[in-house]
């Protein structure tokens, strides 16, 4: 029963949420909104469990002196500080929590993304090595788009921005939509497998 009950609950409520999307009746949509509120409550408990798991894992890392254990100290200190400040002083604009988020976390996050730009540039350099026809087309299109997005491209040739916009709005958009359609079909198939009980990895099984 430890597996059958979760499978039955998943099938019932998953099927109802699919029906609720296609049947806009007040009684159906009302119950669907209530289910979404329940989901928010479950997610809130999941956040609490996630925080407890972070504390447990990093606490064990510190006690066992595992690899990179000194980095666990600032992680736990920052977690405890922001949690305490948010509970005591609130999380609205102008609060101490908001100030630390805007003037400490946001700049550090921007720094991380700035460092990632160098890895992206390195990956782009490796990808643009022209060894096949497809790689050559990718390189040519990338150069045109990059030059068409900066002022120097207009100085080189005034048609570069127009060609760049066409590449972004026609072939790039078509490929992007094809990828999104494929991802959506994959999500639908995965959802159906979960509802029908075919996919059981979330239960810890095969």
Image: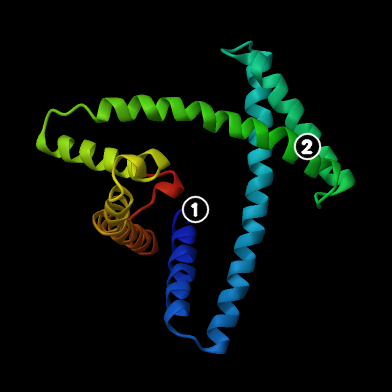
- Mark 1–mark 2 Cα distance, whole angstroms, equals 44 Å
Q: Which residue is mark 1?
A: 2
Which residue lies at the image location 39% right of the left edge and 45% below the top edge?
Answer: 149
How many marks the image carries: the answer is 2
Residue 187 visible here: yes
Q: Nearer the viewer, mark 1 or mark 2?
A: 2
What secondary structure is found at the residue carrying circle 2? helix
In the rendered view, does 28 fall on the left or right side of 126?
right
Q: Which residue is mark 2?
A: 100
Residues tagged 1 and 2 counted as in contact (Cβ below 8 A): no
Q: x, y percentage for residue 54? A: 64, 32
Task: Examine the rendered structure and indicate whether residue 199 appears above or below residue 155.
Answer: below
Badge 2, how many Cα within 10 Å: few under 14, some, many 20+?
few
Query: Residue 27 shows which numbered tag?
Result: none
Residue 206 visible here: no
Q: Name, please, the residue furthest toward the right.
A: 88
Q: x, y percentage for residue 93? A: 81, 51
Q: Nearer the viewer, residue 133 or 100?
A: 133
In the rendered view, does 118 fall on the left or right side of 144?
right
What secondary structure is found at the residue carrying circle 1? loop
> Earlier along the polypeptide chain: callout 1 or callout 2?
1
């Amino acid at each position: 029963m430890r597996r059958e009950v979760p499978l039955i609950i998943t099938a019932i409520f998953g099927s109802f949420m699919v029906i609720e999307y296609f049947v806009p009746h007040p009684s159906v949509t009302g119950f669907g909104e209530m289910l979404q509120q329940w989901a928010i409550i479950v997610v809130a408990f999941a956040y609490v469990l996630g925080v407890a798991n972070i504390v447990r894992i990093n606490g064990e890392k510190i006690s066992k002196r595992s690899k990179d254990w000194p980095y666990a100290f600032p992680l736990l200190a920052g977690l405890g500080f922001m949690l305490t400040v948010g509970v005591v002083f609130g999380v609205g604009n102008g609060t101490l929590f908001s100030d630390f988020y805007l003037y400490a976390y946001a700049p550090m996050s921007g720094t991380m993304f700035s460092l990632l730009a160098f890895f992206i540039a390195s990956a782009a350099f490796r990808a643009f090595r022209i060894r096949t026809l497809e790689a050559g087309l990718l390189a040519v299109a990338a150069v045109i788009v990059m030059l068409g997005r900066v002022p120097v491209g207009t100085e080189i040739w005034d048609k570069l921005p127009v060609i760049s916009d066409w590449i972004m709005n026609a072939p790039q958009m078509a490929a992007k939509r094809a990828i999104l359609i494929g991802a959506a079909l994959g999500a639908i198939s995965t959802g159906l497998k979960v509802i029908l009980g075919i996919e059981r990895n979330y239960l810890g099984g095969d």
